[in-house]
Image (tube, rainbow, N blue to C red):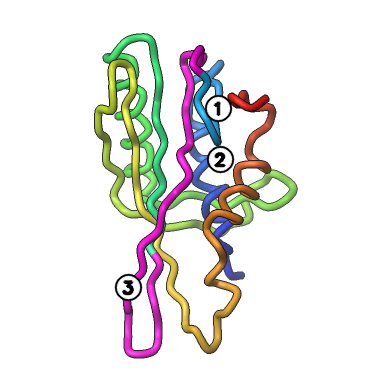
Amino acid sequence: MEITLEQSLAAAIRFIQDNASDGTEWYFTKIPENYYVPSVYFKPPYTAGRKATLRSWCSTITFICWFMEAEDWDAYAKVSDMRDRIMLSGCKIPVFGTDGEPNGEFVRVGMPSTQKIDDGIEQLSFEIETYFHPEKDTQKAEKIIAAWRSAAEKMDGGARDAGS
């Protein structure tokens, strides 16, 4: 089974949601001025492309989320825990079917990294690489924004948003 870009992004979101502390709020498009803590803001990912072989390409999707807490130490502890969970899973994130159960497939991600953004905000980032051959895999070159919106909508589950 081929894993789509949307499934890869949804798997990353689901992994973080499943491993975050209870009571965490989720933000996908904007962070309201009076945001709730603890919360995680999933920034829209960005991409970079490169030639992989003479006839194939690699698209690197950089996945970024911010862990927001009232205290610096709490944000650092939670982002570090999530980074470690990804590494301890062998940098493999399970893919879920429409029934909400793991389907046996995994998305491989690059080594996660963390960075302080502001007081009480720590960033987690990692990369997902997809390879495609332009003559064979025309569907693989999915538009990142469309895939992100679709994945975020499916994984939202009542998330708060500045626009809601």
Q: Which residue is mark 2?
A: 14
x and y percentages locating residue 89 in the rendered image: 39, 45
* 10 Å crowding of disc 1: few (<14), some (14-19), many (20+): many
Q: Quadrant of residue 6?
A: bottom right
Three-letter amino acid code at the position of disc 1:
Trp
Across and down, in percent, residue 124 comes to: 34, 37
Q: Residue furthest top?
A: 70
Label 1–label 3 contact, CB within 8 A:
no
> Is label 1 in a helix, a strand or a loop?
strand
Label 1 – label 3 distance at C-alpha: 32 Å
How far apart are the alpha carbons under marks 2 and 1? 11 Å
Mark linked to residue 50:
3
Residue corresponding to mark 1: 26
**Callout count:** 3
Label 1 or label 3, whichever comes before in sequence order: 1
Q: Position of residue 94 (x, y in %)?
A: 52, 50
Residue in the image at 46% along x and 16% along y: 38
